[in-house]
Image: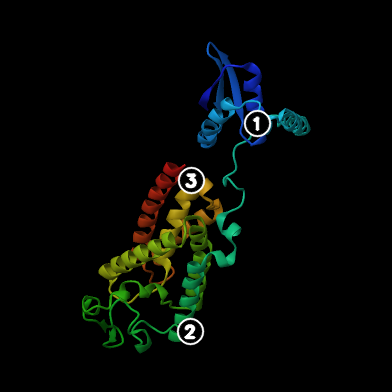
Amino acid sequence: MRSAGTIRDKAHARRFADFLLTRGISARLDHGAEGYTVWVHDEDRLAEVRAELPRFLAAPDDPRYNLSRAAESLREQARQAEVATPRPAAPRPAPAVASGVPAAVRVGLMGTPLALALIAFSVVVAIYTQFEPTYSPRLAKLTIATIERIDVARIGWNGLDEIRGGEVWRLLTPCFVHMSFIHLLFNMMWIFDLGRQIEASRGTLTLAFLVLVLGCSSNYAQYLADGPSFGGMSGVVFGLFGYVLLMARFAPSAGMVMSANNALFVGIWFCVCLTGAVGPIANWAHGVGLVLGLGFGGIGVWLHERKR
């Protein structure tokens, strides 16, 4: 609440306050030694009131300021609304999402084009590659390095020569290579959930940045740990999970949600993958993606609170 100025005459002060009320501006009059100080509750309207006050003082009897009846009608409506609205017995905690509706629901399906494009491209790649092994000729330009089958038990590749030669897309394209229909379905379900939440809440550029950094970083880490024979969006998925988890917990007004059941499921699945019980898994991609996602989530929370 800020002061807009002082009016000496009491009647004029009330007249000006009535005028402001009809303009949707809430003000308070305080009597002092120099007259009546006009206090404006909404600081965003302060400049407007300060600009209007000199015009009022120059001609307080101007018919445009004769709005006492309209102002009193507004006050009566407010009093009736207050009486009609029951007051809760005790204060309740604020909802997890300020609007009550998750961002992905508010924008609708077509409001998240990048998330849908990631799913569509992954499906197209799956149809093209037919879930063949990573050493298949169909995948020669999609894996992080071109893989050759030496014998039944061994594969070979020439380091990252192709990337050094300019094929930089190989750092990201393994994300779109899936080994089975279940592998594809599992990852796309999470992209549909997590990716759409982020894009709807933080924008397409934020999702693009996260996918690019998480994908390239997790793929490179998996290559360093276990060679080029891997694929899938899981590193990105775990990163997006970490991001949404922190945003939903510490910045709920951003419009992202993460149920306790989903968080528990992802945590258990991460641990199960580490055991090797479900076969060869790109655990380094999972781990690096998750750590980076949590880090970006922390930054996202800080930026969101700073803007508020």
Q: Position of residue 39 (x, y in %)?
A: 55, 25
Q: Residues within 10 Å of mark 1 (few under 14, many from 20)?
A: many
Which numbered tag is attached to residue 6? none
- Name the amino acid type tagged 1: Phe
Question: At 42% across and 62% down in the image, what residue appears?
Answer: 205
Whichever of callouts 3 and 1 sits on the residue coming sooner in the sequence is 1
Relative height, residue 161 to residue 243 (above, below): below
How packed mark 2 is, by other alpha carbons closer than 10 Å (few <14, some 14-19, many 20 or more), is few
Instruction: Please name the residue that numbered disc 1 is placed on.
Output: 19
Q: CA distance from mark 3 to mark 1?
A: 39 Å
Q: Secondary structure at mark 3?
A: loop
Type of the residue with mark 3: Ala
Image coordinates of residue 285 in percent, x first then y, are: 35, 65
Q: Which mark is residue 251?
A: 3
In the image, 291: left or right of 266? left
- Closer to the chain start, of discs 3 and 2, is 2
Residue, x 61% and y 31% (percent of image)? 26
Tell me the residue that label 2 is attached to.
127
State yes or no: discs 3 and 1 in contact (Cβ < 8 Å): no
The single residue placed furthest to the top in the displayed view is: 33
